[in-house]
Image: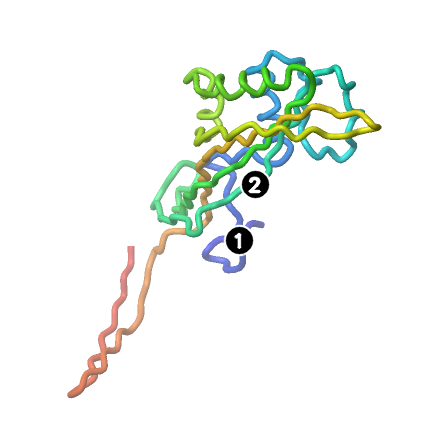
Amino acid sequence: MTNTSATGGPLRPNPTPAPQPVQDANLSDFFQRLVVGLTGLDGSLVRPRWQAVPPNMPSISTTWVAIGVHRRQSDTYAWEGHTPACDGSPDGADVLYRNQELDVLASFYGPQADTLADLVNDGLQIAQNREALQLAGMGLIEVGEAKAVPTKINEQWYYRLDMMIRLNRSLVRTYPVLNILSASGTITSEGSVETLVSTFNVNP
């Protein structure tokens, strides 16, 4: 059973009403599909970075891309507010909003690495191409410079171009912090002359 503000203990976010952010393998798959759409490469040649069991590296004459989230930075302080009732939470809930920056590192390999890097950079300037980002709660901040970082493998220099894509996304989570149905207590005010004591009792 999930804790609520009535039970005490750590709170986990509700899966509804706010959609959960795209994370983990789903986030890698999202960026893989985005690059495939912008470049026209076959999906097998656009690979998530840092795979647990990496496939064999393509030949030196093959153009391909590796992409993955290199860095994420969240706002220091999130905004938290209470809603008396919302979809899926008729007893009220706290809603947390925060922004997060993602640095997505794309590495382009092969004889057409320059062309593909430019296709991604220029393609992200087109509003229709950014719709997938917007639907996933993301927005483009900037596309960084492309840096040549050739890699020597088996006595051969593989041409490689690294480019950082910086994105912003909004995260929304709801937590089961329930409405206060009633409250009672005592307020004590100590002054220099006298102490005032008053009680209150609030019922629905």
Classed neighbour count for the residue bearing mark 2: other residues with Cα under 10 Å, few (<14), some (14–19), many (≥20): few
Q: Residue 116, how many percent across, how many down?
A: 59, 17
Residue 146 picture quarter: top right
- Please give left or right for residue 91 compared with residue 34 in the image: left
Nearer the observer, 102 or 135: 102
Q: Which residue is most to the left? A: 193
Q: Residue at x 48, y 18 (%)?
A: 122
Q: Residue 109, how many percent across, how many down?
A: 68, 22
Q: Amino acid at mark 2?
A: Arg
Q: Is residue 60 above or below residue 105?
A: above
Name the element at disc 2.
Answer: strand
Classed neighbour count for the residue bearing mark 1: other residues with Cα under 10 Å, few (<14), some (14–19), many (≥20): some
Nearer the observer, 97 or 84: 97
Q: Name the mark on residue 71.
A: 2
Lower sequence index among marks 1 and 2: 1
Nearer the observer, 50 or 161: 161
Q: Residue at x 64, y 15 (%)?
A: 112
- Please give left or right for residue 41 compared with residue 125 in the image: right
Between the C-alphas of marks 1 and 2, the distance is 32 Å
Q: Amino acid at mark 1?
A: Asn
Name the element at disc 1.
Answer: loop
Query: Which residue bears the numbered disc 1?
Result: 3
Q: Residue at x 55, y 32 (%)?
A: 164
Q: Residue 189, how many percent across, how many down?
A: 23, 78
Residue 148 picture quarter: top right
